[in-house]
Amino acid sequence: MTTQETSAEAPHTFQVDLRGLVDLLSQHLYASPRVYVRELLQNGVDAITARRALDPDAPGTVRIDATGSTLRVTDSGIGLSEPEVHQLLATIGRSSKRDNLDEARKEFLGQFGIGLLACFVVAETIRVVSRSARTPDALPVEWVARGDGSYTVRTLAAAEHPEPGTTVHLEARHGSEQWFEADTVADLAADFGALLPYDVRVGDEPVTGRRPPWETEHSSPTARATALSGYCQDTFGFAPLDSIELDLPLVGIRGVAYVLPGVVSPAQRGGHRVHLKGMLLTDRAETLLPDWAFFVRCVLDTDSLRPTASREQLYEDETLAAVREALGDRVRGWLAQLATTSPERLRRFLAVHHLGVKALALHDDDVLRTMLPWLPFETSEGELTLDDLARRHRTVHFTRTVDEFRQVSAIAAAQGMAVVNGGYTYDAALVEALPLARPGTTVEELDASVVTAHLDHLDPASELSLAPFLATARARLDPLDCDVVVRAFHPAALAAVHLDDRSARHERARADAEGEADDLWAGILGALRDEAPRARLVLNHLNPLVRRIAALPDADLAGVATEALYGQSLLQARRPLRPVDQALVNRAFGELLEWATPTARDDQPDDFRETNR
């Protein structure tokens, strides 16, 4: 073996800049300086848990004292010997709980050996005085760490820390004094540690001692519901529409899901409040529930879910996936129970959160069948459930956009067609899934061509008599890429309807883009030209006004009236007017006023009349 080969295979040791590493972990791992209180509480609680594993009767206390410039946290935990101080406190990433990681996840809060570094966010130095409970005659050990990555260790006299346990001393970093104010520390300790099983106090004020309402016995179901609702008001700041208890002992979860009292967007991810063995992990857990359950906010305590290294989110693994599915099942079960036992409560819930239930129904056939009689949809016959509509009609039509529904709903209803507005979130997909819940029901998509096919044609003599008028009308609307046809349909009061299928809209959008593009892009768009049917203005021959317009001897006046009917049909369908449509409506209105006031019209100069043609 050559010297070069030997040199290449020799191992090397990573060089670590301790100051940079401490800065990275303490300044960038955590989202806010407030977590330093949580990490100190965590270390104290884990130390007590370790001591009670040796002595079940050992005291379980954590005392916090804040002066505005200093902070002292004392616990009655297992403590550390001098070798353990070097091994655990001075080795980043090494934790006493990692010697048996599976057991650590069951019993301890911390696992990563970096929690104490959070204190460097607010303190320049960390002083730890600890006395081990494993060795009765062990002397206290002092460990002092600085932000530059250096530390010192020395042994103290027994009188300086007479009892087993650990005390952490912090002095505020310049600019961080507000985090050491007594009231701030008390609020943070109460927020993070209110559910801890040990006696935690800030000064003389207890932080722990009150059990959450889901773990408390109540005199009646009403009293329990009131207590759960009050906890929601105190924790989240709203009075819930309902409460869903979450008791999953197999995965160590207890808590409550609160139904929001107001409408929320499906895109808004829930900020759930998760405690890990009593310690608040995060109040912004977004992946705890399935996406469809955006209408609830959870607060729960768990001993099975894993935190990330910063302990500010949940670690995505198989356990979290299983818990997410189990919690989703609880929400499903609550909905099924409401449908069976409390229809009025279900109606109140759906009045606010039908969108969330529709999202769930898309992914769960059982929920679809259960909720079908309750979910509201906009239809051509008013607001109905799909179940009611399917009982009345063997064939259910739907549109994919709100504009399409507005175009066809009135005439479709008059022709006895059942049409659902599928333009809202989830609605089109749910209508398409209707046969799964009601076998035998036919679902068909409806567009302008289908509606036109359902309208009655005129007899040949009437068609022939209308030929001159149709030629005039089509000439007027041809620049707008709109055809004109005459049909007989109900309701007779509807003079005209503008029908515009998707292919026609796409072609018109392509043509508009081609007109505004440069030569190269216009050539590309021109190659995409489609011969799709144009939009249609369908005039109703049953309407007296249409018949009078068609019979006008003045072709110009008939053309202006047709343009006015075109504009009216767009407005009735609540379609946005293009600039060319707006110009046409304004011109037609002006010319109709001229025709209605012939004397004034005759007084105008010829060039004025030509300009307004």
Image (cartoon, rainbow, N blue to C red):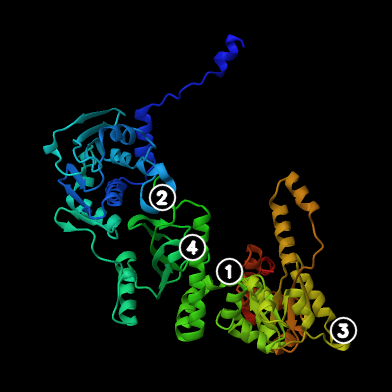
User: From the viewer's perspective, is the residue at label 3 or at label 4 nearer?
Assistant: 4
Query: Which residue is under mark 4?
Result: 289
User: How far apart are the alpha carbons under marks 2 and 3?
Assistant: 91 Å
Q: Which residue is mark 1?
A: 425
Above or below, 305 relative to 569: above
In space, the residues marked 1 and 2 are separated at their CA atoms by 46 Å
Q: Earlier in the sequence, mark 3 or mark 1?
A: 1
Q: Secondary structure at mark 4?
A: loop
Amino acid at pointer 1: Thr
2 vs 3, front mark: 2
- Give amino acid for label 3: Leu
Q: Which residue lies under the disc numbered 3?
A: 464
Which amino acid, by three-letter code, is at mark 4? Leu
Quick check: 329 above or below 435? Answer: above
Give the quarter of the figure containing the C terminus. bottom right
Q: Residues within 10 Å of mark 3 (few under 14, many from 20)?
A: few
Q: Is there CB contact under 8 Å for labels 2 and 3?
A: no
Secondary structure beneath label 1: loop
Q: Could you say which quadrant of the image residue 423 lies in?
A: bottom right
Instruction: Name the residue that disc number 2 marks.
Output: 103
